[in-house]
Every structure is written in C-alpha cells, then in structure tokens.
Amino acid sequence: RSSDLRQRRQSAASRDSAGCGGGRGRSGQGLAHNWSTLAEAHPPPRSGLQDDVLLRPEPRPVRRMTGETAVAPPAARQRQEGQLWDSIRKTAFVLGSGLLTFAAFRNSVTWHLQTFWGASGYFWQVQWGKLHSFFGGSEWILFSLGTLLIPSLSFWFFNAILMVIDCTGKPHFITRYRIQLGKNSPVDMVKLRQAAFTVLCNQLFISLPMVMVMYPFMQWRGNPCGPELPTFHWVLLELSIFTLIEEILFYYSHRLVHHPSLYKRIHKKHHEWTAPVGVVSLYAHPVEHMLSNMLPPMVGPMIMGSHVATIMLWFCLALLSTTVSHCGYHLPFLPSPEFHDFHHLKFNQCFGVLGVLDRLHGTDTLFRQTKACERHVLLLSLTPLTESIPDPPKKSQ
C-alpha cells in the first residue's frame, strides 16, 4: 500500500509540473472550478441579518410627485368648476321658467273660470270638496283616481293624437316639425301595435301594483286624501323637489341599465326605436319600467307625504313630459325633445331628463358639438328648427 501511495503522489506531482507550462490556463480553470464546487457544496454560514438583506425585495425607485401629477392643472379645475356652475344655472333656469309658466297658466285658468262660471275665489278647493263628497270620502277611490286613472287617461289621450299623426303622416303642419327627417313616415304599424300592447301590460301589471303598495305608505305618512287642498305655493315647492329627485334617480338608473351586463337583457327593448314616437316613452322591459319609469316620479311624493291632488298633477306632468321627449316632433311652444331624441340616436349620450347631471358627468359632450344642441331650445316661431338650423351636409363616401 505504501508503494501505491508513493506512485500516486509522484504521478500527481508530474501532472502539476506539466500544468505549470503551456497548460496553465486549463489548470487555473480547473482550480477555480474545484473551489466553486466546494463553495456550493459547503456554503459559509450566514447571519440572520445577511439572510434578511438577501431575501428583501429590491426597492422600487420612488417617483416624486410633481405638481403636474399630484394636483390638477388650473385649466382642468376651471373647466370642472365651469361645468358645475353651468349645471346649477341650467337647473335654476329650467325649474324657474317651468314653475313660472305653470303659475301663470294656473292663475289664468282660475281667473277665467271665476269670471265666466261665477265660481268662488276658492275654485279648486270647492271642486275638490264636491269630488270628495261625491265619493263619500273614500280614500282608496280618490287615491286611485288621482294616481292611476286621470294620469293614464291624459297619457293615452295625448298619445292617441300622436299615433294618428304617425300612422297617417297628416296633417303636414305637424309632421313638418319631425326631428329625424325621413324616419317613421309613416310609422311601422306592426311595431306600433306591439309597443302599445307592451305599454298597456306595463301599466296594468306593474304600475297598478306599485300604486297599491304606495297607498298604505302614503296613509302612514299623513292624510293624502284629506278634504283640504295644499296651498298653491306649497305645490310649487313640492313640484320643484319632485323634479330634482326624478332627475337624480332617473339619470343613475338609466346609466345602470346601459351597463353591458344589463343592456342586452333589459334596456335594449326600449332602444329598438332609434327614432322614437310618443307611446314608446313607456315601452320597456318590466324591470326597467319599475326601476326607471315608476320609481323616480314616485319617490318624491312619498318623501314629502304629498296630497293626492299634487300627486295627480305631478304624474300627469311627468307622463306628458316623457311623451313629448319621445314624440319625435319639435313642436312650437312645447319643451324641446332634441336632448332625449339624440340619446335614442346615439345610445351613449344624454341620459338624464333636464341634462344637469349629463353636464356634470360629461355625458353630453358629443351632443353639445352637434346642430341638435343648437336646436335644443323652446321653439317660439312657426318655422321648423330643421329648416332654420339644418344639419351639415353629409360627406360623400
């Protein structure tokens, strides 16, 4: 064994001496490889601090917030403040002019009735007293008349006139005020019958049960069918509050049903009419009819605990207003339907009633760049706005 060990040592020494010549590079690489192998097999012990430093993730470079990213530019702030102030002014103008018009109409009608019919100074109170006595003070009958029958009759009376015009295309002095020229001339009778049937179903199977649920709540809030009417000034105040509540609830519920997950299942039915007609105002999926058509006008009277006479007036105004917004005609001396008609044309603009929240959220940007926005005014002449403010000619393909 000792002789074998000596031979191995001599052979190893001869290899080392040979490596010191021309094979120096290969020998150096071999030694380095051996040391790295030993280091990997037997790593030196690490302290806890070293482990913590090695395992700690590399810190990301910190970006210092500059004035351009942390704070909105002055121009952007001024634009937002301008939109908010513009929305407030528009709200005040719409509510103020509407209430003044209603007040003037109410006083004028009262004056004529007093003059020609010899009624007392409390004309409306006297008429309500007679109606209250005729039904023996039955609150359910009075409430049904004020919240269902009279508003529904006013809706169908107005829409019956519009449907005759849409079906016949006559008289010409009405059809010349059509907003989307060449559309519904004449209207598709099959689609119109389907829309009218859907509206009747919505009123019978959704509106009626909701009003029946509303009645005990209004009784809990107060005396909705009392023999004494509210004062005229209190009615004006309530109508202004109802309008603001409806604008808020309708805008956000309308935006909700435009969400992709709900649009195809619910709201697409209403948008089958890109050029709407009056009766289409209530042509909707049952869920939408409950959420967007019924709740927004109902919540205001429920919060205020209003008298049934005020509710009747408000429901009639709301139904006539939405009919005008969908009728497709920009008629003289009636509210402009350009805003909502543009919504049916483009789908993703003009979600509200007054346009206040659309201005605040910027959902009327495209509308304000069109001729339709210039035509969105109260027409005080007999010249159609499509003639005085025509659309720009379409570019040739």
Image (cartoon, rainbow, N blue to C red):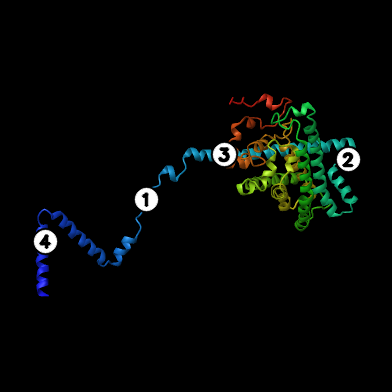
- The residue closer to the viewer here, 139 or 198, is 198
Label 1 vs label 3, nearer the camera? 1
Kindly identify which residue carries mark 4.
16
- Say which label, 1 or 4, has the lower sequence index: 4
Name the quadrant of the N terminus: bottom left
Q: Amino acid at mark 4?
A: Asp
Q: CA distance from mark 1 to mark 4?
A: 55 Å
Residue shown at 74%/27% (left/top)?
176
In the figure, residue 95 lies in which quadrant? top right
Residue 119 numbered tag? 2
Q: Residues within 10 Å of mark 2 (few under 14, many from 20)?
A: some
Kindly identify which residue carries mark 1.
62
Q: Amino acid at mark 3?
A: Gln
Q: Residues within 10 Å of mark 3 (few under 14, many from 20)?
A: some
- Against 112, is 7 above or below? below
Which residue is most to the bottom? 1
Label 4 vs label 3, nearer the camera? 4
Circles 1 and 4 in contact, beta carbons < 8 Å? no
Image location of residue 292, percent across then percent down: 69, 47
Q: Secondary structure at mark 1?
A: loop
